[in-house]
Amino acid sequence: MSPAAAPIDTAPYDAVLLLSFGGPEKPEDVLPFLQNVTRGRGIPDERLKEVGEHYYAFGGKSPINDQNRALLAALRESFDEIGLDLPLYWGNRNWAPYLTDTVREMAADGVRRAVVIVTSAYPSYSGCRQYRENLEDAAREVPDAPRFDKLRHYANHPGFVGAFVESTAEALSKLPDGSAIAYVTHSIPTAMNATSGPDGNGYLDWHNDVAASITAEVERRTGQFRRTDLVYCSRSGPPQVPWLEPDVNEHLEVLAAEHVPGVAVVPIGFVSDHMEVIYDLDTEAANTAKKLDLPMARAATPGTDPKFVTMLRDLVVERAAAERGEQPDRPCLGALGPGWDDCRHDCCPPLRRPARVEDHA
């Protein structure tokens, strides 16, 4: 019998928190959920009901909560494989389990310090700082709340990039030779991108860097160079406010006009198949491609891909080592280097902007 592996040192952490956006679980949840997302921004219920049709088309249920449940189960299994003895908790920004309730549960369980996995891989206000503000607000409401440390941005980690390399190659295998790649992410106001990351333009820079890493590996494997573009979905707000463009549907029209033989749509801005993926891409963009007679295949998001789950586990171990004053390896791909553990106070400042009501996470 081989000796048992030595336990993994998790100090100073005694728990892990999965922090996500949340989404409705049934039709009667849809309007209250959208009201939570847009609270204080003066958006009338009539407009929210219009957006709610996206959810009603799928039975009134967002897939995001089930995806987080699956991720938690996969993380638990992965933690147990290496003896990572940390309890896992889950809290959401906009729907049950609400973050404040989860923080209250953690405090009651005696958790003193937790590392936080956020289901958003890139720097921006809505993808990073707002979650940190949510944690601060929850901690203020709960006596003896734990201290929270968020994992570094992980979009350029080999585990995240590698999962997309495999799914991109799989999508391309279903398409004619010479097909293009359209990397897709959630559009944000250009002003938000301008102030994202510690030095600005971080949202766009990180996406371009990740896309380049995926493209380089796909081309290395296939020996085929192909057209690639970064495009966007889920734009909202008044038309006079500039957002990142082009929209994925407009881009498909361009590809069709240029007689591109097909396109792999790769949602690099998303960790799992939530509403922007299944509605904006699998429904709207797929319908656009069909009308254009443009062959399209959508690459899978990481979800519970073993590469992605192992990456999250390794990042927990990495952050614990860093907090103990060690110098752990920080794997990353591309030109930007590894993400930072702690955000500057002026990083990704909030903007006065129209609300987004989809479940971006």
Image (cartoon, rainbow, N blue to C red):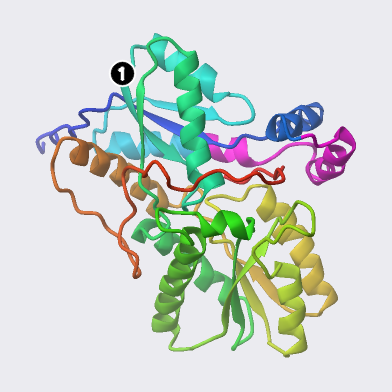
Q: Position of residue 165 (x, y in %)?
A: 45, 68
In front: 7, or 271?
A: 271
Q: In the rendered view, tell whether residue 157 sits above or below residue 350.
A: below
| Residue that mark 1 sits on | 112
Quarter of the rendering occupied by the N terminus: top left
Q: Is residue 70 visible?
A: no
Residue 211 inside the magenta-drawn segment: no
- Horizontal and vertical percent position of residue 310: 34, 48
| Quadrant containing the C terminus in the rendered view | top right
Depth order, front residue of 232/183: 232
Label 1 Cα neighbours within 10 Å, binned few <14 / some 14-19 / many ≥20 = some
Please give the name of the residue rendered at 78% of the width and 59% of the height, measured from the top-left corner. 240
Question: Mark 1: which secondary structure?
Answer: loop
Q: Which residues are magenta?
A: 42-69
Which residue is at a point 58% across and 65% down the rendered structure image? 299
Q: Residue drawn at (46%, 40%), measured in percent from left and top?
A: 118
Whole-percent x and y of residue 247?
71, 67
